[in-house]
Each structure stands twice: as C-alpha cells, then as structure tokens.
Image (cartoon, coloured by chain):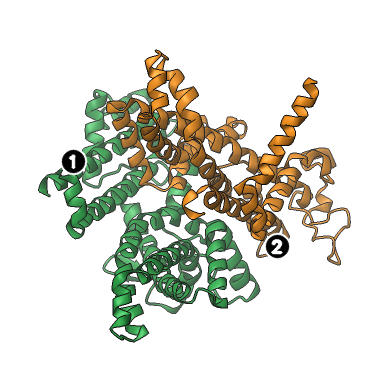
Chain colours: A orange, B green
Amino acid sequence: MSMNKETDEKMSVIARVLDSDIWYSFTRSKVTMVAALVTFLIFASALFAPIISPHDPFDLASLSLMDSLLPPAWNAEGDPNYLLGTDDQGRDVLSTILYGSRISLAVGLVSVAFAAVLGITLGLVAGYMGGRVDAIIMRVADVQLSFPAILIALLIDGTVNALVGGMDRERSAFTVLVISIGLSFWVQYARTVRSSTLVERNKEYVQAARLIGLHPFLIMLRHVLPNVMGPVLVIATINLALAVITEATLSFLGVGIPGTQPSLGTMIRTGNDFLFSGEWWITFFPGAMLAALVLAVNLLGDWLRDALNPKLR
Amino acid sequence: MLAFIIKRFVQSIVVMLVVGLIAFVMFRFVGDPVDQMVGLETSIEDRERLRETLGLNAPLPMQYWNFISSAAMGDFGTSYQFKRPVADMLGDRLPATLELALVSAIFALCAGIPMGVFTALYKDSVLTKLFQAISLVGISLPTFLIGILLIYVFSVQLQKLPSFGRGEVVDIAGWSTGLLTVSGLKALILPAITLGLFQMTLIMRLVRSEMMEILRSDFIKFARARGLTPRAVHFGHALKNTMIPVITITGLQLGSIIAFAIITETVFQWPGIGLMFLQAVQDVDVPIMAAYLLMIAFLFVFINLIVDILYVVVDPRIRIEKA
C-alpha cells in the first residue's frame, strides 16, 4: 500500500516535470538539448574517470619516458595504445584529460557552493536584519564588485600561497583555489538574495512567523530562504562556467593546481611549452575539452535564465 | 550636488585606506621584511639597525601611517628580488601595459560597435548569426586559450607574427613605445586582439541591445515619418543615442583591461606590469605585489568616482533620487 503511494508520488513528480513550462521550453530548444547532453557526458566521464580511462596517469610505475610526446593514434608515429597521444612525461593525454576535468569540475563545483553559501547567508542577514549590518555587508560587496573576480582570486591565491609556501603548497592547492574563487564570487549571490529578502520580509507569512515568536534565525532559514532560491540557481549555473575558467586561468598562470595531478588549465600550461616544437596535441585536447565544457554550461545557464524569467514568456 | 561629490570622494578615500591596510598587512606579515632584504651572514646587530631605520619597531598604527603616506608619494619600497625601488620598476614597465590596453580598447570599440549595429539592423542575416557565434565563443573561451590559439595559427603555422615580446621599441622622453617601429606594431597585433576580444563581444552585445531598444522608441518612428533616409535615422539618431552607455561601460572596462592584461602578458611574455606582478606572486616579492594592488585599486576607485560624478552631471534623474 505504502509502496503504491510512493510510486504514485514518483509518477506524479515525473508527470509534473513533463507537464511543466520549463520542460516544454527545454524540448523546444535544440541548442539547449545538445548543451545538456555535452554537459552530462563531461560530468559523467569526469565522475567515472578511474573506470573509463585507458591508463592511470598518476601511477608513476606505468609511465615510461620512452612513450613521451607520442602523437595521437591516427598519426603515422602514433601508438594505438594512446588514442590522443602522450605528454612530456609519457602520460596518456586522454586519461589525463578525464582526470583533469574531474579536478577542474571539483574545484568549480566546490567553489561555487562555497560562494553560494557565503553569499546567501550574508544576503539573507543583510536583507532581513537591515540597518548597520546591511550597510556594512553591502558596502564591502560594492567595493569588491568594482574589481574583476580574477584579480581578487589571484591576489588571495598569491598571498595564501606565500604564507603556506614550499612543500605544503601541493597539498593545499585545492583548498586555496576553492577559497580564493569562492571569496571572489559571493557578491552576486548576496546582492540577489538581499533584494528578494527585502521583498519577502514584509509579506504576511513572515509577519505571522514573527508573531508566533519564532527565532529570526529560524524565520530566515525555513521561511525566507526557500522563497529566494530561484534566481540563485541561475547565478550558480553561470558561475560554474566562470569558476571553471578562473581555475583554469589560475592554473595556467602557475598559481593553481600543480603539475603532479594536473587540471585542464595545468595541462594547457604544460602543453604551451611544446607548441613551437610541434606537439600541438598536449595543448589542443585539454583546451577543446575546457572550451566545450564552458560553452555547454554557459548555454544551459542562458536557457535557464530565460526559462525561469516570467517576463519573457 | 556638491554634497554628493564630497560624499563619494570621502568614500573613495576610505576604500583606498582599506586597500592600503590590506597591502600593509601583506607587506608586514607575509614573511619578515628584514629577512628578505639581508643576506644570511648579516649579524643580529645589523639586522636590528636595519629594522630601526625601516621603522619596523614603531607601533603598528604608526607603521601603517608611514606605509600609506610614502605610498601616496609614490614610494613603494624596494623589491626583494631585484633590489630596485618598486616605483622605478613600475615606471619602466607601465608604457608597455598602457599601450597594449589602449590598442586593445580601440580594437574592441572599432570592431564591436559596427558588429553591434549590424546585428541590430539585420536580425536574420547570415552574418548576424556568425557575429553572434563569435560573441558566444568570445565569452566562453578563456583569454589564455584565445592567445594560445592565435599564437599557434599566426606564429607557429603561418609564421607571420611574433609570439612574444614587444619587438623594437623607441625611447621618447623616458616613454618606450613600440608604436613607431614595424616590428613593434607587428608584435602588438596578437596580444591586442587577445586582450580586446572579450571587451569586443561585450560592446557588441551592449550596442545591439541598446540599438534594438532605441529603434522601437517614438522619436525614431517620428524620424522615419518625417521621411529621413534610413542612414540618417540609424546613424544620426539611433547610434548617437546608444553611445552614452557604450562610453560609460568602456570607461569602466578600462580597469578590467589592465587587470586582464596579466593573463595576456603572460601568454605573450609582454614586458608589462601584469607580467611583473605575476612573477612577483610566484616569487613572493611582497613590495611589488602591494604596489600593484594599490595601483590597480587606485585606478578602479578613480574611474568609478569619475563615472559616478559624470552620471550625476549628465542624468538629472539620479540627482532627484539622491535629494
């Protein structure tokens, strides 16, 4: 009986999704469907990299310098074992890309989550509390917004790396990147959440919650938060693309993920040194992967923004 | 009006003081300044003497004040690595970055505005689709990837343009310019396109949306009804009115161009301040990092201040709102 009810509910959720405006606009746009497919494929291949990669690029024992700088397999000098060729250390480019996109996506997702949590919290508090707290938070946000995010990330990253220094840098690279990218992206969330909170807090349900004596913290968390989350989703999607670009840029500049466990940006940095000697594949394939990922996520974000915007319907 | 300007001015100074505090904390606490300046053999007494002459024994607020006031007069201390005054090093390298930023801004305007006008006027043309595809790529491709792509095509494959450096430079009254020699101009092409491409797509999208909105407005309909030629309507009336936001955004983007120059300068080994900053980050050369931070902050705060004041001067609606 209860099983039945559960399946019924599940069915109704699927039915509701299939019946919704968003699904309709999704099926109407071929570009969006392709973008979703590409995004899904990249996410899946990154997630299952250890299973689907033909080689393990981090297993030092399996690397051989004899196999270094091999061109892609369709080339006359290529080795069918290495479909997209190998880099200067003899690592399989295809496997390294799969593992690399795993790292790039992980940095992107975690830093977007960090920025979102920080921004939403500060935005909620600023909008709900008002007064001096609001003024301070928004002033900081204004100042930060007038500087490009990449510059802020670079400064935080550089300073923290200087403080950590040396050997620890390799281990802390991921955390440092996440913090610096997260700290440079929170403003947008805070501003959006704050402006919706300002509208919501004067509505009757919030007043009612206040009347029955709920703690302000609970009102913000349980009542206001769910009603201001809509636009956050759109920002987060577009931000994911930006965060991946920022990570790649920092790694390319040599202050991001180190070369032992390369991200896409680190691979492009390595490959850049070999561009003139003709080994184009070390740069090209990670670059193409990065471009495809960013483009697909951007297109999804654009579509989501339009689909959730009632004015455009 | 005057009150608003004063208020904005005070705000800008507060922002600069806060950025100065960050730079000071970096300078003072990221590694010991004395350790960075002297060799291993220096005795403890000598270190103490240096510490005293540098004013590092004064109370911290006093040190902060000294730091800020000497920075305001253009003294950013001495680079740990090069043992040269940071202000001189910045001065040497500033022309390269400014020339690159200027040329790429001109490129962005000269390419972005016509593309924006065209896509607004001919919505269904094949060329419009092409321009929009380019703008999507321009926004999605990271700057460094565009640079590498250009290098691969024009330097490695075609071997037409240099991939690094500024080429020959001419020194005019302490300003080294690459704009007067053939090799200097050639060296400028690829970095300027790389740096300007993002701004170009931004301007193109802005011109397009502004233009489409203005073309729907009443005064354009009236101009058409008066029998003016399409050319006069489009360029004399519509385009003229899109220019105000375009100029503002371009002005605001100037700071971004200089910040993004870090990436372009790294890709092309362009000897500007961005490349110097990045090398300083990698070598933990804190005085250079602090000086760069202060300089960029000053640039941004200054541009924002000017734009805000201009807004109030130009647009009376903002004045009413403030009052």
Q: Can residue B53 be seen from the camera position used here?
A: no
- The extreme top residue here reads A213
Q: Is residue B283 left or right of residue A29?
A: left
Where disc 1 sits, the SS reads helix
In this view, B316 is above or below A49 = below
Chain label for disc 2 = A
Q: Is residue A160 left or right of residue B51?
A: right
Q: Amino acid at mark 2?
A: Trp
**Residue drawn at the location 28% of the way across and 73% of the way down:** B219
- The CA distance from mark 1 to mark 2 is 53 Å
Residue B78 screen position, x and y as percent = 33, 43
Residue B258 screen position, x and y as percent = 39, 56
Judging by the rendered image, the residue that carries numbered circle 2 is A280
Quarter of the image for the C terminus of chain B: give it.
top left
In this view, A273 is above or below A159 = below
Label of residue B152 in the image = none
**Residue drawn at the location 58% of the way across and 59% of the way down:** B145
Judging by the rendered image, the residue that carries numbered circle 1 is B10
**Residue drawn at the location 23% of the way across and 56% of the way down:** B311
Q: Can residue A155 be seen from the camera position used here?
A: yes
